[in-house]
Image (cartoon, rainbow, N blue to C red):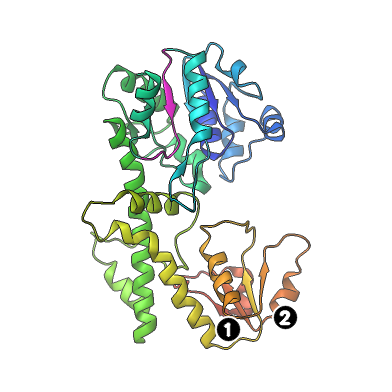
């Protein structure tokens, strides 16, 4: 079966690699460097399992800049397009995704077009109606950003937003990409599938926020947060996982889903989900005050590999400290940063996690990492 994958991001490449074991896959997007890399057998994913998987499997996978070429003869089209939130309105920007879907529908009439992006609730049905296309459906992905291929190959479950033959066909394609036997599959309505994606992400964000607020309470009341968390997590209904406090939930996915649901709850009585989107800001305000209480003269923020991102809690904390008048330097490990000099020149270093390279300055590191292995 020929499958076209539109997109060159993490989700698209993970899908393409997983599907290419048993199908002829053509991936397409407008980034020449990425297309060239894929055709050279280089896949820009951070998942450490990529190299071993590629070496162990004969993959039928190529990339092209020509979307029409990729769509020619395709029996299934998978679309993953990057989405962002409009900071002024909180609405998702879907213009690019819609243009890709419309092109796929025009060139491949009747072929299943599978939306893998985390679209707003109601998006798929609206597009079906505007295009008069029943072949469009949503099948959200639930991969972790750093283990995207592993999760594509071994999904914990599969959600498909169509309860008819179209949904059955798409679920069979996704099951065929999985290496794990017996993956649970749930067929449901389009809007319900979209909601599953966002509510699951919001729950994960809420769990992070919960343990962060437990830690904030312990900080304010002089309690040992580690002891409290260890005790709370003895309850098997809570579990001892994803319980290490941090500066806030980050990445691309959790903040967007939390914000989208917060914006879409208008008119629905609710107290929990709409507040998840504000949890990071409250947490960062408290942590900034705790850092400033130590009256450091020069603060270093240790964030190797950092890029500018609105949803990065460590960068948000940095900005809050700068706004308070503190002298703050950011270490990213790029542009010739001297780590030894960084450690020596700052009397307080803020770090999300107490990693081994910070062991020798642990006494001047500010972190809420309660389970450090350093």
Tell me the quadrant of the picture where the C terminus can be found: bottom right
- Mark yes or no: residue 44 visible: yes
Foreground: 149 or 272? 272
Quadrant in the picture for residue 51: top right
Residue 75, placed above or below residue 122: above
As drawn, the residue found furthest toward the left would be 269
- Mark yes or no: residue 241 visible: no
The numbered disc on residue 345 is: 2
Element carrying mark 1: helix
Quadrant in the picture for residue 163: top left
Crowdedness of circle 2 by 10 Å Cα count: few (<14), some, many (20+)? some
- Tell me if label 1 and label 2 are in contact, CB under 8 Å: no
Q: Does the magenta portion include 25?
A: no
Gap in angstroms between the C-alphas marked 1 and 2: 14 Å
**Residue drawn 43% across the image and 15% down it:** 111
Viewer-nearest of discs 1 and 2: 2
Q: Position of residue 310 (x, y in %)?
A: 54, 57
Q: Earlier in the sequence, mark 1 or mark 2?
A: 2
**Residue drawn 34% across the image and 73% down it:** 214
**On the picture, is 333 further left or further right than 91?**
right
Residue that carries the numbered disc 1 in the rendered image: 363
Q: Does the magenta portion include 115?
A: yes
**Residue drawn 48% across the image and 53% down it:** 88
Q: Position of residue 337 (x, y in %)?
A: 75, 66
As drawn, the residue found furthest toward the front would be 88
As drawn, the residue found furthest toward the right would be 336
Q: Position of residue 247 (x, y in %)?
A: 47, 68
The numbered disc on residue 251 is: none
Q: Position of residue 140 (x, y in %)?
A: 39, 36
* Magenta-highlighted residues: 110-120
Magenta stretch, overall SS:
loop
Counting every numbered tag in the picture gives 2
């Amino acid at each position: 079966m020929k499958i076209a994958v539109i997109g060159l991001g993490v989700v698209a490449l993970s899908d393409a690699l997983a599907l290419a074991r048993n199908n002829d896959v053509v991936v397409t997007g407008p980034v020449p460097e990425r297309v060239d890399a894929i055709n050279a057998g280089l896949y820009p994913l951070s998942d450490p399992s990529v190299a071993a998987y590629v070496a162990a499997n004969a993959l039928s996978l190529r990339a092209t800049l020509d979307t029409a070429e990729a769509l020619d003869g395709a029996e299934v089209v998978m679309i993953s397009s990057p989405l962002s939130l409009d900071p002024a309105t909180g609405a998702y920007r879907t213009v690019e995704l819609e243009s890709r879907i419309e092109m796929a529908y025009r060139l491949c009439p009747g072929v299943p077009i599978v939306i893998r992006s985390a679209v707003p609730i109601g998006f798929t049905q609206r597009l079906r109606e505007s295009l008069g296309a029943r072949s469009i459906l949503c099948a959200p992905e639930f991969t972790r950003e750093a283990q995207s291929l592993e999760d594509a190959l071994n999904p914990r479950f599969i959600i498909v937003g169509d309860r008819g033959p179209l949904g059955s066909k798409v679920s069979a394609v996704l099951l065929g990409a999985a290496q794990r036997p017996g993956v649970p599959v749930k067929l449901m309505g389009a809007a319900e599938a979209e909601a599953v994606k966002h509510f699951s992400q919001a729950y994960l964000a809420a769990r992070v926020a919960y343990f962060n607020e437990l830690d904030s309470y312990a900080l304010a009341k002089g309690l040992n947060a580690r002891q409290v968390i260890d005790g709370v997590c003895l309850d098997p209904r809570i579990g001892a996982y994803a319980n290490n406090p941090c500066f806030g939930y980050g990445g691309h996915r959790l903040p967007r889903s939390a914000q989208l649901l917060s914006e879409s709850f208008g008119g629905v009585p609710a107290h929990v989900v709409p507040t998840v989107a504000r949890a990071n800001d409250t947490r960062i305000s408290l942590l900034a005050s705790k850092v400033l209480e130590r009256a450091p003269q020069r603060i270093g923020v240790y964030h190797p590999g950092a890029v500018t991102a609105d949803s990065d809690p460590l960068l948000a904390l940095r900005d809050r400290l700068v706004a308070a008048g503190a002298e703050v330097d950011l270490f990213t490990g790029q542009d010739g940063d001297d780590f030894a000099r960084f450690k020596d020149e700052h009397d307080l270093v803020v770090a999300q996690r107490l990693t081994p390279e910070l062991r020798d300055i642990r006494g001047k590191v500010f972190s809420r990492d309660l389970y450090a292995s350093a």
